[in-house]
Image (spheres, grey):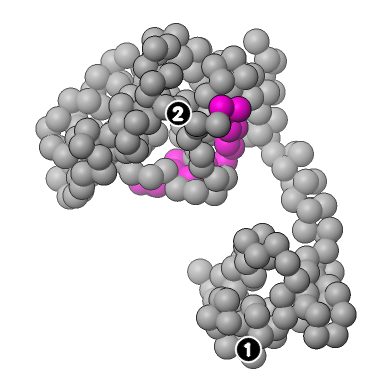
Amino acid sequence: MSKIVERTLDLLELFAEEKRPLSLSDIAQLLKIPVSSCHDVLRAMQARGYLYEIAPRVGYYPTLRVHSLSKETVDNDPLLMRTEQLLRSLRDTLEESVLLSKVAGLRAFYLLVFDSSHPLRVRMKVGDSVRSLHGSSAGKALLGSLDKRALVAFLKSAKLAPLTKQTITSGAALRKDIELGRKRGWYLSREESLAAVTSISVAFRWTRSVYIATIAGPSSRLDRKLENTASLLTDICHRLENQSGPPKPP
């Protein structure tokens, strides 16, 4: 990725993290980039109406143009139009976190995150990558979507590092677990990626791409309703895969 693109994205993310006006020197220091390079990005974004200077020596802040463009884009996202109602409804029914990720090669990143209302819950951010391929249920769903040759190649080269005491670290055991997931139609991680957290994932295809829907929560709650949770998630993913337009909520 070009440096100018990276710095522009870093700048927008910095304002979201800092939540305050930032001067040129603040930005250069926080991003650890030369003042001259930072100045070029600031001037370009200011000229396009994405940033404004609150007052001399007070600092810069994003304008509402960033929000306006983001909202316009999100409101017309064909995937979100298909999935949002169903996944939000699933979150409300189960009262657990529901996530949607998109597979890109051997990576998957979250497109939608609906947090549980419980104080004790699993929290992820849109844009985050799936934590691990061998420990998380979403990672296993990704591996389960690979053809035989690609899966064998992964198992031969991957370092299956332990993330918790329950993480599968044997290639043979992981392959067996993935085959079980394929057979039943859903993948399980019981405290294998995060301690005391259970998650269930189902992969589905749309427009020749693989997406993964995940339900995650404390094992103390999710283990009691595992089969029902898997059944609801599997049903919704089948509907998402087989419907051509925005699906109706249940």
State yes or no: residue 19 in magenta: no
Name the spot of residue 78 as percent of width and height, x first: 68, 35
244 vs 38: above or below = above
Name the spot of residue 156 as percent of width and height, x first: 15, 45
Foreground residue among 74 and 12: 12
Instruction: Characterize the magenta stretch by its predominant secondary structure.
Output: strand
Q: Residue at x 55, y 31 (%)?
A: 119
> Which numbered circle lies on residue 216?
2
Q: Residue at x 14, y 30 (%)?
A: 173
Q: Residue furthest bottom?
A: 36
Residue type at the position of mark 2: Ala
Circle 2 packing at 10 Å, graded few (<14), some (14-19), many (20+), is: many
Residue 249 in view (yes/no) = yes
Foreground residue among 204 and 19: 19
**Circle 2: element type:** strand
- The residue segment tinted magenta is 103-118
116 vs 47: above or below = above
Query: Mark 1 — residue?
Result: 35
Name the spot of residue 177 as percent of width and height, x first: 22, 25
Circle 1 packing at 10 Å, graded few (<14), some (14-19), many (20+), is: some
Residue 205 in view (yes/no) = no
Marks 2 and 1, the one that precedes in the sequence: 1
Residue type at the position of mark 1: Val
Determine which quarter of the picture holds residue 225.
top left
Q: Residue at x 65, y 28 (%)?
A: 84
State yes or no: residue 105 in magenta: yes
Determine which quarter of the picture holds residue 31.
bottom right
Determine which quarter of the picture holds residue 34.
bottom right
Q: Quadrant of the C terminus?
A: top right
Q: CA distance from mark 2 to mark 1?
A: 43 Å
